[in-house]
Image (cartoon, rainbow, N blue to C red):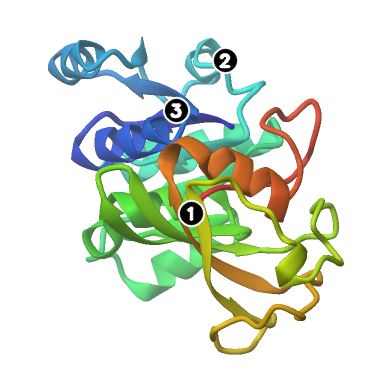
Amino acid sequence: MRFVIIGAGRVGLRTARVLREEGHEVTLIERDEGKVRRARNQEFEVVEGDGSREEILEQAGVREADSVGALTGDLNVNFAACMIAKHYGCRTIMRIDEDYRENIYRKYADEVDEVIYPERLGAMGAKNALLGGTIRAIADIAQHLQVVELTITDDAPVNGYTISELQLPADATVLAYGKRDGELGIPTPDISLEEGDRLAVLADFDVLSDVRQLLVGGTESRAEAEHGGVN
């Protein structure tokens, strides 16, 4: 998947690193020269400029992006960037500081796909928001291992399969299963997978994309599919 992140500060850069480690394409937008240098030193593609300006977002590839995360400390920049990204059909994630009043939160929450408080969520939470609801990171087990929760979609190749028929990559294994609104539990071999069912999977970062393709469906480009997400 392709992501544009506005803000290469602590939250934005850490979120970008997590996404890149999982094989996603990430472009950062930052106007502070020091932060631009730091991100480029970590081999990120960075567009230098104001992320609330449409021409800057276009330079960063908003037309091809699946999701845009406005993760700066400036609420006005974040909101403007999300409104532009929404015009291009992107999923929009807006950072809001924890000390904003509840009525301010409600005002903006209706205009974007998700509002996040990085002080509470950290980089993993920001990443989950960017990826959407079909895949959710639960825990990092080791440097290259992660537990993710995936929701079976109507497009999933394994929709209708039983657990015993499910063939995940060698570096991935099912840990738990649950119905749409039910609790996760130990799966039995004859359970049939249906849309809305959830699986908790332990997987190496290198095979997460393959796991996603099997359990969620879709492709990694907006041109080929209109929905999807990853942990």
Circle 1 residues within 10 Å: few <14, some 14–19, many ≥20:
many
Query: Residue at point 62% right, 40% down?
Result: 210
In the rendered image of this protein, does residue 195 appear above or below residue 131? below
Q: Is residue 216 visible?
A: no
| Cα distance in 3D space between marks 2 and 1 | 22 Å
In the rendered image of this protein, does residue 187 appear above or below residue 226? below
Task: Pick the residue in front: 103 or 144.
Answer: 144
Residue 63 as seen in the image, left or right of residue 155:
left
Q: Earlier in the sequence, mark 1 or mark 3?
A: 3
Query: Which quadrant would the N terminus be assigned to in this image?
Result: top right
Which label is found at residue 52?
A: 3
Q: Earlier in the sequence, mark 2 or mark 1?
A: 2
Which label is found at residue 129?
A: 1
What kind of residue is marked 2? Glu
At which x and y percent is residue 127? Answer: 42, 48
At which x and y percent is residue 186? Answer: 54, 84
At which x and y percent is residue 169? Answer: 58, 45
What kind of residue is marked 3? Ser
